[in-house]
Image (cartoon, rainbow, N blue to C red):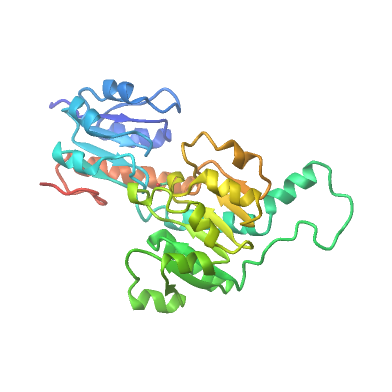
């Protein structure tokens, strides 16, 4: 019997997903949740044909040169900013990600974060838990309305469109968006969505939500200049990637009242946070969990497994990021 191909799982995942992988491959699992530093990842990848990746592993030319047996990197995330796709293609390594399966769950969370920021929900809870609730007052923890307001979406891919549906159909919002390319008219029309230039998006949005993929070009897409264009009554929600926003500039704008509130699920340099953000009450902070419902996390894992099985048996994967040469 031919030796089974070897696969490394980069971080702890659900046991039944490991069991599924083990039906096909010889699997090495990590002992805990700690991310593997690249030298350790390289060491463990020796002799492995496949990597089940969780999105935080740095897959670059250094790693690829040191791992000649590697043929497939299958991410359970949709974001792939830590993977050098060109270098993977040059080394004959196929890469897949996990789009679609997390779209609705991530959109739910983004919308919730926006609501929490606009209606000051976590601030209100902290106020109450701190025993500060004494008496009713006319503007106690009064925030902004979401229904009927203008929803600005930066990045109109699958998740952006899912957020637009929630805004347009559930909350009667006017949807404006900016994206490199306009949506087809048959997608725009039912949403009543309007493509606008980035500056106009910033000026008009009552609630701006960022859903753009991270790339060096998207670094600090929202910085001090862009924040200055926004309405002081507006909110900003980031479920994209930390580097898309200049967190220091955002904290300054929030502290100075130049922006009403923010909802942030992703941060520059996460899991570390800019301490200036922690000191503010008008920002809702969550630890990069927009896709974290149990069914969705399982679906993300299963798609990565399907892709690994396909690639290592010589078939085409379901969701490739680079092509076979
Ligand atoms: C993704 O899939 O890119 C998410 O950010 C991970 O939770």
Above-or-below relation of 39 to 249: above
Q: Residue at x 30, y 31 (%)?
A: 22
Q: Nearer the viewer, residue 115 or 101?
A: 115
Residue 117 in which image quadrant: bottom right
**Residue visible at 63% across and 54% down?**
261
Q: Is 167 placed above or below 26 here?
A: below
Q: Can the viewer see residue 105? A: no
The quarter in which the N terminus is drawn is: top left
The answer to whether 227 is drawn above or below residue 21 in the figure is below
Marks counted in the figure total: 0
Q: Quadrant of residue 190?
A: bottom left
Q: Observer-nearest residue: 255 or 24?
A: 255
Q: Quadrant of residue 91?
A: top left
Where 193 sits versus 231, above or below?
A: below
Measured from the top left, where is residue 286 in percent x and y?
57, 44
Q: Where residue 226 appears, x then y in whole percent?
A: 49, 57
Q: Is residue 168 left or right of residue 70?
A: right
The answer to whether residue 120 is left or right of residue 136 is left
Residue 89 visible in rendering: yes
């Amino acid at each position: 019997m031919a030796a089974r191909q070897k696969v490394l799982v980069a971080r702890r995942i659900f046991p039944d997903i490991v069991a599924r992988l083990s039906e096909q491959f010889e699997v090495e699992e990590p002992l805990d949740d700690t991310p593997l530093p690249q030298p350790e990842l390289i060491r463990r990848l020796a002799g492995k044909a496949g990597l089940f990746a969780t999105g935080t592993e740095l897959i670059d030319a250094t790693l690829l040169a040191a791992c000649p047996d590697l043929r497939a990197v299958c991410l359970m995330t949709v974001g792939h900013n830590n993977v050098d796709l060109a270098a993977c293609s040059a080394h004959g390594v196929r890469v897949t990600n996990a789009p679609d399966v997390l779209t609705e769950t991530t959109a739910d969370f983004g919308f919730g974060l926006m609501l929490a920021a606009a209606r000051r929900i976590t601030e209100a809870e902290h106020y109450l838990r701190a025993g500060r609730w004494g008496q009713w007052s006319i503007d106690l923890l009064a925030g902004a309305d979401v229904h009927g307001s203008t929803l600005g979406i930066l990045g109109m891919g699958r998740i952006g469109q899912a957020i637009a549906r929630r805004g347009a159909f559930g909350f009667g919002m006017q949807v404006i968006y900016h994206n490199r390319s306009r949506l087809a008219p048959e997608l725009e029309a039912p949403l009543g969505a309007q493509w606008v230039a980035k500056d106009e998006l910033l000026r008009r949005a009552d609630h701006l939500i960022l859903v753009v993929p991270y790339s060096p070009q998207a670094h600090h897409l929202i910085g001090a200049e862009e924040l200055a264009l926004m309405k002081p009554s507006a909110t900003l929600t980031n479920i994209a990637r930390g580097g898309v926003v200049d967190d220091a500039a955002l904290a300054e704008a929030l502290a100075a009242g130049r922006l009403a509130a923010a909802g942030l699920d992703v941060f520059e340099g996460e899991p570390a946070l800019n301490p200036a953000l922690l000191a503010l009450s008008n920002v809702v902070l969550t630890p990069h969990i927009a896709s974290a419902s149990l069914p969705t996390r399982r679906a993300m894992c299963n798609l990565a497994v399907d892709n690994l099985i396909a690639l290592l048996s010589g078939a085409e994967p379901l969701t490739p990021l680079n092509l076979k040469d």
